[in-house]
Amino acid sequence: LCPPGVLPLCCRPPAWDRATRPPPSPLQPPGIPCRSFSNNKIQVELDGSSGVAMMKLKSPPVNSLSLELLTEFSISLEKLENDRSCRGVVITSAVPKIFSSGLDITEMCGKSTEHYGEFWRAVQELWLRLYSSSMVTVAAINGSSPAGGCLIALSCDYRIMAENPKFSIGLNEAQLGIVAPFWFKDTFVNVVGHRTAERSLQLGSLHPAPEAHKLGLVDELVPEEKLMEKAAAVMAQWLALPDHARQLTKTMMRKAVLDRLVAHREEDIKNFVTFISKESIQKSLRMYMEMLKKKKS
Ligand code: CO8
């Protein structure tokens, strides 16, 4: 039970319905830092003095976005969003060499249609929360970041990537025989522009870090050991501005894309379930998983 005057998380308006941060709770005096928290899949530490949280994905071996990780990710963002002392979040990985391998393919293979529906709703939920976040969001990309991993990074306000050319990033869905949905595409276009997005999406390209930087897919490259220092500096620059002006500007830039999914959410789930349930698509995904396993041996 929540204390009087505090809505439970599930009853609070989602971030994309709010132009600015929620009013302070009478039970939470300003200046009190929220506790750090972690679960099986995510570790969050909030620095009360700077108002910046460090969120680390820790789901080895490759931080694939399973239903559990997606859910924990959304809950963690919601907790920070509702904490007045938190103004920004750096998203990074606790797994060496991998930021996130994207959606967990095993969640999309050989499961029931109900499961596919639940899974896709969780993917939508995370994107809606992250893309509409009123916090400053910085992706510190310390490893490879294909498909859904790239979407997480694209949804942030700023992307800094470790300059290792072995790390790659992109929306490679076409390589798996699947199609990135319209809101993945919209998010990509908003970062790199139409032409670059069109070519990269059709080819399912994974861009090595230096190429990703050239295309504007990531904003900066830094040596891996400087990644967190750089993220803190970028965060300080963005937080130097008044929150409300930055938040309203962000809403203005992103609202049309967010509204499009909100308006077509159920239809998008239906489309996903129909598409992913097709035997031809299931076969492509199974072959892709086998290819990943063979690559090892
Ligand atoms: N999901 C599930 N398992 C995965 C995934 C994944 N996305 N990625 C890797 N794994 C598994 C591997 O199969 C392997 O399993 P096992 O140990 O049992 O053999 C284990 O994780 C480790 O993988 P690797 O040995 O390949 O690890 P490496 O460090 O050599 O490479 C990479 C890491 C670069 C991340 C590599 O694993 C890779 O390229 N993975 C595939 C990434 C990918 O293509 N993801 C796309 C997912 S689809 C998506 O996100 C958007 C879908 C939109 C759907 C729209 C439909 C309408």
Image: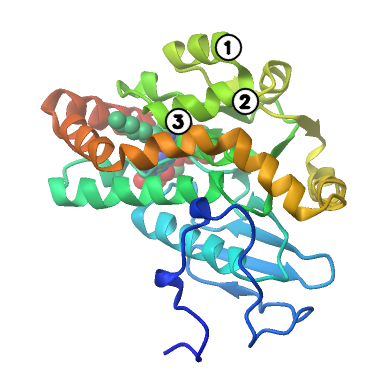
- Residue 112, how many percent across, how many down? 13, 48
Q: Are marks 3 and 2 in contact (CB under 8 Å)?
A: no
Q: Residues within 10 Å of mark 3 (few under 14, many from 20)?
A: many
Query: Which callout, 1 or 2, points at the residue further toward the start of the chain?
Result: 2
Residue type (three-letter) at the residue carrying disc 2: Val
Kindly identify the residue that appears in the image at 74 percent across and 29 percent down: 219
Residue under label 2: 191
- Residue 190, how many percent across, how many down? 58, 25
Q: Is residue 280 left or right of residue 6?
A: left
Residue type (three-letter) at the residue carrying disc 1: Thr
Label 3 beta carbon less than 8 Å to ligand 1: yes
Instruction: Tell me, for residue 121, which label it has, or none.
Output: none
Instruction: Tell me, for residue 196, which label it has, or none.
Output: 1
Label 2 residue SS:
helix
Label 3 residue SS:
helix
Kindly identify the residue that appears in the image at 45 percent across and 11 percent down: 203
Q: Is residue 25 visible?
A: yes
Q: Residues within 10 Å of mark 2 (few under 14, many from 20)?
A: some
Label 1 residue SS:
helix
Residue type (three-letter) at the residue carrying disc 3: Phe
Q: Quadrant of the N terminus?
A: bottom left
* Observer-nearest of 64 and 235: 235
CA distance separating discs 3 and 1: 14 Å
Residue under label 3: 184
Q: Is residue 104 left or right of residue 167?
A: left
Q: Is residue 171 visible?
A: no
